[in-house]
Amino acid sequence: MRTVTVELGARGYPILLGRGASTGAAGLAALRDVVGGRRCLLVADRTVGALHAAGWRQALLAAGAAGCERTEFPAGEGSKTLATLAELYGVAARAGLDRSGVAVALGGGVTGDLTGFFAATWMRGIPFVQAPTSLLALVDSSVGGKTGVDLPEGKNLVGAFHQPRLVVGDLAWLDTLPEGELRNGLAEVVKYGAGLEAAFFADLERDAAALLARDPVVVERVVARCCEIKAAVVAEDERECEGGRRALLNYGHTFGHALETLTGYAGFRHGEAVAVGMVLAASLAVRLGLCPAEVVPRTTALLHRFGLPTRLPADPALTPDAMLEVMGRDKKTRAGGLRLVLPTALGATALVAVTDVAAVRATLEVARGKP
Ligand SMILES: NC(=O)c1ccc[n+]([C@@H]2O[C@H](COP(=O)([O-])OP(=O)(O)OC[C@H]3O[C@@H](n4cnc5c(N)ncnc54)[C@H](O)[C@@H]3O)[C@@H](O)[C@H]2O)c1
Ligand SMILES: [Zn+2]
């Protein structure tokens, strides 16, 4: 087992990673510091709840929790809503969970974001523990304190920064993760290498087969490296300030979100959309003369090895005009042009104000409808 620390002063916390992290002595000791003598509300979706909640609840009780209420909701992004949040408030109220309680999220990013936002707002804020069970949650959503829910008008529109007290990533939970969800998380893994650290990208090129085969040593090393990279970015720029590094974690995401929006969140998993988005961003950067040409084939090749798409499908809804229109609404856009995270080399990115709309259009056109 290893520990990665998110250095945020009084709001800092450890991320425990490894097979058996939730049941081993070190895990239980760290858990005791947070839940000892306190009542817990354990939140999971039904899929993860059926697989892992009973064992995790036992661990919470073994760590000295004074009680542990369980609640579950239907799996999927469709549950990351105000309605599910209202149900959590109801469960907490009926259970008499007060300010000494602890919320515990067991699951993927949906459970983590929802439970985190519950914890940020219940009784004006109670502590919470993240127990990520998807690769995406392990490497991304459980670290950094962004919590929230979706509205019918858009994703993640309501939220709060609320850092967890502890993240427990028991990598044995990944054994039950479906293949498609593994690939979904691998897109974010590639993002850390391609966007922030060339040496890690090279490690991924070397370890791709072992990672896909879920080799435990490689999985632990890769997850830990991702958490270290994200923890360092978050420590520098906790709240995604103007000009801060946290925005760079959105590499591939502006193009990706447009793709998700235009396909009604049905055509692509988030990670698949981000994979296409990184290739589009890299292609645009090359076209603008901002980065060396090799970035595109190397990024594409690694994404292919992970079974991820790298092209826009020949969908009539995905015209360059439609993509540009949605991208213009992106949170990072400011009056006067697009602001995109673009690579400047393999493993390096910058937030760039792009005024050459023709270049974006040409990039989108070239990427369309090819295999
Ligand atoms: N807070 C952040 O910083 C941040 C960062 C990235 C993404 N997100 C959010 O994360 C969400 C996506 O996360 P996700 O991909 O984990 O989605 P998810 O929580 O819906 O999980 C994906 C699917 O995998 C299943 N699953 C998870 N772990 C499993 C396991 N161990 N065994 C079997 N099945 C398992 C779930 O039941 C679900 O069906 C989005 O809502 C996104 O906005 C948040
Ligand atoms: Zn993402």
Image (spheres, rainbow, N blue to C red):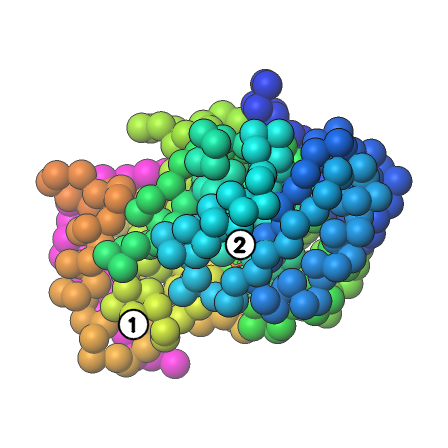
Rendered residue at 15%/53% (across/down): 357
Q: Quadrant of the C terminus?
A: bottom left
The percent position of residue 139, horizontal first and vertical second, equals 59, 49
Q: In the image, is residue 368 part of the stretch drawn in magenta?
A: yes
> Of 290 and 118, which appears nearest the observer?
118
Q: Amino acid at mark 2?
A: Thr
In the image, residue 239 lies at what x, y percent?
A: 41, 30
- Looking at the image, residue 303 lies above or below residue 17: below
**41 or 140, which lies in front?**
41
The amino acid marked with disc number 1 is: Thr
Is residue 173 in sight in this rendering? Answer: no
Is 60 on the left or on the right of 180, as rendered? right
Determine crowd level at label 1: few under 14, some 14-19, many 20+ residues with C-alpha closer than 10 A. some
- Residue found at the very far top of the displayed protein: 9
Query: Which residue is painted at 49% across and 25% down in the image?
Result: 236
List x then y, in percent, for residue 283.
33, 58
Upstream in sequence: badge 1 or badge 2: 2
Q: CA distance from mark 1 to mark 2?
A: 23 Å
Report whether residue 358 is seen. Answer: yes
Is disc 2's CB within 8 Å of ligand 1?
yes
- Residue 263 is marked as 1
Question: Based on the displayed image, in which of its 4 quarters is residue 321 positioned?
Answer: bottom left
Q: Secondary structure at mark 2?
A: helix
- Kindly check if marks 1 and 2 are in contact, taking CB atoms under 8 A apart as contact: no
Residue 184 among magenta residues: no
**Magenta-tinted stretch:** 349-371
Q: At x 28% / y 80%, what residue is drawn?
A: 314
